[in-house]
């Protein structure tokens, strides 16, 4: 690797990588070879045809550079590789889609995403994606150390209400029927508690058909956890410890530890919002992360048709027995407080969870308050009501939208800057250009007919 040449003066090395720059000095050519570890200068005869961003293999001897030719800006600036054998493994077109030597913000989004595999080569995105990997790795480490089991849940599933529209997938072998892609693994993770795992986590992809915004896309990833026999404080402590462990691993600094806790009411009174930013100007300059918990949200709020809707998660339990009684008796509905807890970081909501209701009659009452009729409750959530009749432990959990946390840490304003292959603002996928039309044969096989939407 490029970086290792530092320790290999006088030795022969084989390097594979990309041509970062070419400086043609007539008889001799200098190239900077780039690989995952960094850059190293290589010197050789005139290298015909070579273009930047080509992939090459170089075999050569590492030499110490004379003092006056040392490049202090390069980690390997005290050495260079004298090219012996040189092979082009893949020649890049001369005309590149855009330059890579900037942070890339100035380049038009469509173009960056069409050539995302190329865009990702830039330093900033290499860093963002690698830090993302480090964060997830550290979170895993923490969770494994606390006895969690990593379990995958289905992608082809049934709708779970998380407040967004579903993406649906037609079923070929059940014509006229559709799967929904998961908005979150909420119901499955609860069923895993019924199944006796006690501590579950998953790096879960969540799909929600909602308007794309700076910090929201069709797809996002959560560190999704669920635990049995726990209180609200137990889950909050676990998430807080995981966050501190993982964020410290990537070098983050915190302005407040332990994370302060505000009630929803306090937050609204103090900050006028439940997604507030506690940082002072100085803390902002220092790039510190400022986390805070928000608890004691109302369970329900009025919807546009004067019915009730849930504020966070219909599977949550009320805060205590008194509120559970109100819920069962459909009394004081607007006053019922949920066990929900949200974690905010620098003004972004980065985690949310709750203690769930594991009593079938309470869950049923929630759906009744939300206006569902018996038939609908049974067809949509009958499996949960049934599972809760076979020994379901009290349980609760949380999901961390760690991509927003990374945005805060990396100083990025857009979710797409921390995702490898994000969508455009108009919902088209990077590189592959989906969604796309299906051919007639496929439509027939699926029993589908496309009706052009009215303009
Ligand atoms: N399923 C919830 C969400 O995606 C998180 C949770 O309550 O665990 O927001």
Image (cartoon, rainbow, N blue to C red):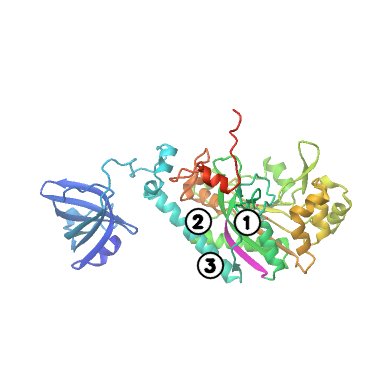
- Please tell me whether mark 1 or mark 2 is closer to you in this view: 1
Q: Which residue is mark 1?
A: 399
| Residue in the foreground of this view, choosing between 313 and 95 | 95
- Please tell me whether mark 3 or mark 2 is closer to you in this view: 3
The tag on residue 277 is none
Asked whether 243 falls inside the magenta stretch, the response is no
Give the magenta-colored segment's residue range: 197-204
For mark 1, does the 10 Å Cα neighbourhood hold few (<14), some (14 to 19), or many (20 or more) residues? many
Percent from the top left, x then y, of residue 452? 58, 33
Classify residue 353 by image quadrant. Answer: bottom right
Q: Which residue is mark 2?
A: 252
Task: Check mark 3 vs ligand 1: CB closer than 8 Å? yes or no.
Answer: no
Q: Which residue is mark 3?
A: 141
In the rendered image, is residue 9 in sight? yes
Asked whether 202 falls inside the magenta stretch, the response is yes
| Residue in the foreground of this view, choosing between 340 and 67 | 340
The furthest residue to the left: 27
Percent from the top left, x then y, of residue 303? 76, 39
Q: Are discs 1 and 2 less than 8 Å apart at CB? A: no
Earlier-in-chain disc, 3 versus 2: 3
| Residue in the foreground of this view, choosing between 65 and 20 | 20
Percent from the top left, x then y, of residue 366? 80, 52
Q: Secondary structure of the magenta portion, mostly?
A: strand
Earlier-in-chain disc, 1 versus 3: 3
**Numbered-mark total:** 3
State left or right for residue 312 relative to residue 109: right
Percent from the top left, x then y, of residue 405? 55, 52
Tag 3 secondary structure: helix
Earlier-in-chain disc, 1 versus 2: 2
State left or right for residue 157 relative to residue 111: right
């Amino acid at each position: 690797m490029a970086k290792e040449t530092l320790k290999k003066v006088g030795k022969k090395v084989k390097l594979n990588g990309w041509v970062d720059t070419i400086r043609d000095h007539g008889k001799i050519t200098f190239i900077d070879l780039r690989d995952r570890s960094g850059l190293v200068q290589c010197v050789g005869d005139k290298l015909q045809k070579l273009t930047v961003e080509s992939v090459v293999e170089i075999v050569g001897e590492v030499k110490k550079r004379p003092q006056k030719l040392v490049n202090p800006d390069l980690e390997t600036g005290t050495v260079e590789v004298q090219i012996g054998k040189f092979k082009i493994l893949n020649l890049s077109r001369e005309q590149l889609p855009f330059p890579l030597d900037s942070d890339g913000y100035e380049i038009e989004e469509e173009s960056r995403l069409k050539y995302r595999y190329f865009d990702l080569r830039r330093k900033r995105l290499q860093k963002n994606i690698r830090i993302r990997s480090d964060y997830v790795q550290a979170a895993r480490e923490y969770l494994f150390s606390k006895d969690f089991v990593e379990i995958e849940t289905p992608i082809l599933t049934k709708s779970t209400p998380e407040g967004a529209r579903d993406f649906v997938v037609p079923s070929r072998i059940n014509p006229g029927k559709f799967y929904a892609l998961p908005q979150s693994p909420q119901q499955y993770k609860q069923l895993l508690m019924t199944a006796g795992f006690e501590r579950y986590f998953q790096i879960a992809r969540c799909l929600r058909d909602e308007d794309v915004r700076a910090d929201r896309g069709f797809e996002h990833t959560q560190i999704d956890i669920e635990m049995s026999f726990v209180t609200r404080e137990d889950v909050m402590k676990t998430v807080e410890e995981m966050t501190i462990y993982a964020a410290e691993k990537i070098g983050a600094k915190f302005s407040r530890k332990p994370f302060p806790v505000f009630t929803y009411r306090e937050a609204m009174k103090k900050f006028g919002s439940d997604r507030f930013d506690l940082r002072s100007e100085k803390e902002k300059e220092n790039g510190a992360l400022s986390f805070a918990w928000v608890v004691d949200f109302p369970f329900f709020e009025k919807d546009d048709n004067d019915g009730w809707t849930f504020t966070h998660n219909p599977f949550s339990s009320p805060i205590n027995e008194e509120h559970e009684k109100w819920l069962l008796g459909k009394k004081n509905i607007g006053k019922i407080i949920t066990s929900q807890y949200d974690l905010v970081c620098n003004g972004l909501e980065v985690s949310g969870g709750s203690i769930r209701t594991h009593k079938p009659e309470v869950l049923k009452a929630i759906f009744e308050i939300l206006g569902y009729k018996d038939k609908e409750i049974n067809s949509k959530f009958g499996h949960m009501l049934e599972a809760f009749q076979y020994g379901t432990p009290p349980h609760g959990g949380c999901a961390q939208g760690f991509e927003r946390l990374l945005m805060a840490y990396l100083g990025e304003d857009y979710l797409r800057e921390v995702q490898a292959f994000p969508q455009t603002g108009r919902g088209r996928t990077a590189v592959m250009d989906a969604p796309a039309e299906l051919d007639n044969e496929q439509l027939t096989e699926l029993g589908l007919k496309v009706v052009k939407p009215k303009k």
